[in-house]
Image: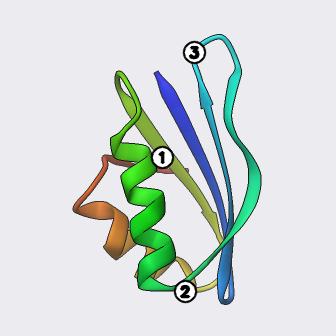
């Protein structure tokens, strides 16, 4: 199973993606909270082989727009 970890803060999220065997698909990288940047992230997640889970760590309510954008694209796991 692929794992997408997202640490959400105001205006940006830090994202990393790993595949089985602890293979790094995407090293931790800041993704701005713009529609185009989130769409690029969604495209990357959709392009992964196999099952993918997303785990978001958030502060306050900053996660809400990101969760809304991602919820139509991938299965979310609240942690």
Q: Position of residue 4 (x, y in %)?
A: 56, 43
C-alpha span from label 3 to label 2: 31 Å
**Of the image marks 3 and 2, the number of the one nearer the N terminus:** 3
Q: Position of residue 23 (x, y in %)?
A: 69, 21
- Closest to the camera, between mark 1 and mark 3, is 3
Left-right relation of 48 to 20 = left
Q: Quadrant of residue 53?
A: top left
Dot 2, how many residues are within 10 Å of its Cα: few (below 14), some (14-19), or many (20+)? few
Q: Position of residue 71 (x, y in %)?
A: 29, 62
Q: Which residue is mark 2?
A: 61
C-alpha span from label 1 to label 3: 14 Å
Q: Which mark is residue 54?
A: 1
- In the image, residue 58 sits, relative to residue 22, either above or below, namely below
- In the image, residue 21 sits, relative to residue 22, either above or below, namely above
Left-right relation of 12 to 67 = right
**Mark 3, secondary structure of its residue:** loop
- Closest to the camera, between mark 3 and mark 2, is 3
Do tag 3 and tag 2 residues touch (Cβ < 8 Å)? no
Dot 1, how many residues are within 10 Å of its Cα: few (below 14), some (14-19), or many (20+)? many
**Residue occupying the point 33% across, 44% down:** 46
From this viewpoint, which residue is outermost toward the right?
Answer: 28
**Mark 2, secondary structure of its residue:** loop
């Amino acid at each position: 199973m692929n794992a997408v970890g997202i640490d959400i803060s105001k205006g940006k999220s830090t994202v990393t993606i790993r595949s089985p065997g602890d293979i790094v698909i995407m090293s931790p990288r800041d993704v701005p909270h713009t529609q185009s940047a989130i769409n690029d992230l969604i495209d990357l997640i959709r392009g992964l082989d196999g099952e993918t889970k997303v785990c978001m760590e958030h502060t306050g309510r900053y996660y809400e727009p990101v969760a809304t954008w991602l919820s139509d694209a991938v299965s979310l796991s609240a942690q």
